[in-house]
Amino acid sequence: MLTGLAVGCSSDRRNPVDPSPPPTGSARVVYAAIGASDAAGVGSSAPCLPFTECPNGRGYVPLIARRLADGREVSLTNIGVPGSVLGPAMQALARAVGRDIRSNFVENQAPFVPRDATLVTVFAGGNDTNVVSDAVRQGLAGGNVKGYIDQQVSAFRRDYEDLVRAIRNRAPQARIVVGNVPNMAALPYGTRYAFEDRRTLQAISTGFTRQAVNPMAAPGLVVVDLACDGRAYEPSRYSGDGFHPNDAGYEFLAEVFLRGILEGQGGLPASCAYMEVVPSL
């Protein structure tokens, strides 16, 4: 049985504790989803408005909730807001390059995770990759593009650590399942860019995965692999813009996240051919 959305907020700053395994096999799952347009199912045949009940949505979040509801009571809080980036530093950079980003995960989504959540999913990095790529294109990197990207990857890692800390302060017993970042240069929209822009997209997105997301894997925090799964790059899984998944793409995302939710492991490869589709910077 799938029950409706509920939200709340707090400024509680207690130290996080190591969570115990979630009761995904029990009768009740309290699920909170943090994300951007993917969490809302943009590009699918049935997208959802933020902070609304959307039981028939075709994005990966409602798909996960419906599949978990087989024999369980599932309470879903979908906090995802289209256009969001990970943290306040990336939001400030977005505004500096002319992107009107009005939400970030750390400040505007984590405070709404229910305190009794047993499961939290996070998918970040797509919008952030595009923001940093715009900054490079507009000359903010100066003559050291690689060094600038390394700085942005480090800032992304710090913001992700802040996000995880905030989630655990809110819901210390929740299993957190996060998706790493596909190589954006290999996505359909990325293949339309010029060579140097593709190199930039690749350096940013693979840097996020290798240096920020994958190293977070730990008891109670599962990282599921999208970067080295060939299905993440199939054009047939994307909507017309080549960036947002379509129904088939969201089915894929739901499958990968569900494996991490139910099995508690992600199976991350150290590297793969998908991580370098153009020569590195």
Image (cartoon, helix red, strand yellow):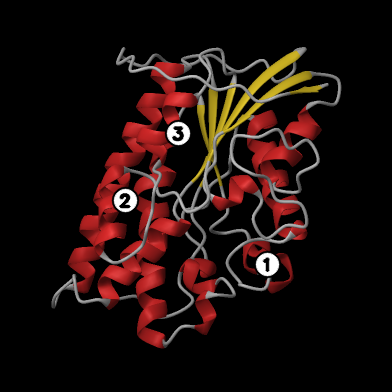
Q: Is residue 212 left or right of residue 233?
A: left
Residue 87 drawn at (x, y percent): 33, 43
Q: Is residue 260 above or below residue 128?
A: above
Residue at image coords 57%, 54%:
226
- The image's mark for residue 109 is 3
Residue at the disc numbered 1:
238
- Tell me the distance, in whole angstroms, between the alpha carbons under discs 1 and 2: 26 Å
Residue at image coords 33%, 71%:
134
Name the mark nearer the viewer: 1 or 3: 3
Q: Is residue 31 above or below residue 160?
A: above
- The image's mark for residue 91 is 2
Question: How dense is the environment of label 3, judged by Cα within 10 Å: few (below 14), some, or many (20 and up)?
Answer: many
Amino acid type at image mark 3: Gln
Label 1 vs 3, first from the N-terminus:
3
Q: Is residue 200 left or right of residue 24?
A: left
Amino acid type at image mark 2: Gln
Q: Secondary structure at mark 2?
A: helix
Label 1 vs 2, first from the N-terminus:
2
Q: Is residue 197 above or below residue 126?
A: below
- Tell me the distance, in whole angstroms, between the alpha carbons under discs 3 and 2: 14 Å
Amino acid type at image mark 1: Tyr
Residue 187 drawn at (x, y percent): 56, 71
Q: Could you tell me which quadrant the N terminus lies in?
A: top right
Judging depth in this view, the residue of 181 and 106 nearest the camera is 106
- Tell me the distance, in whole angstroms, between the alpha carbons under discs 1 and 3: 26 Å
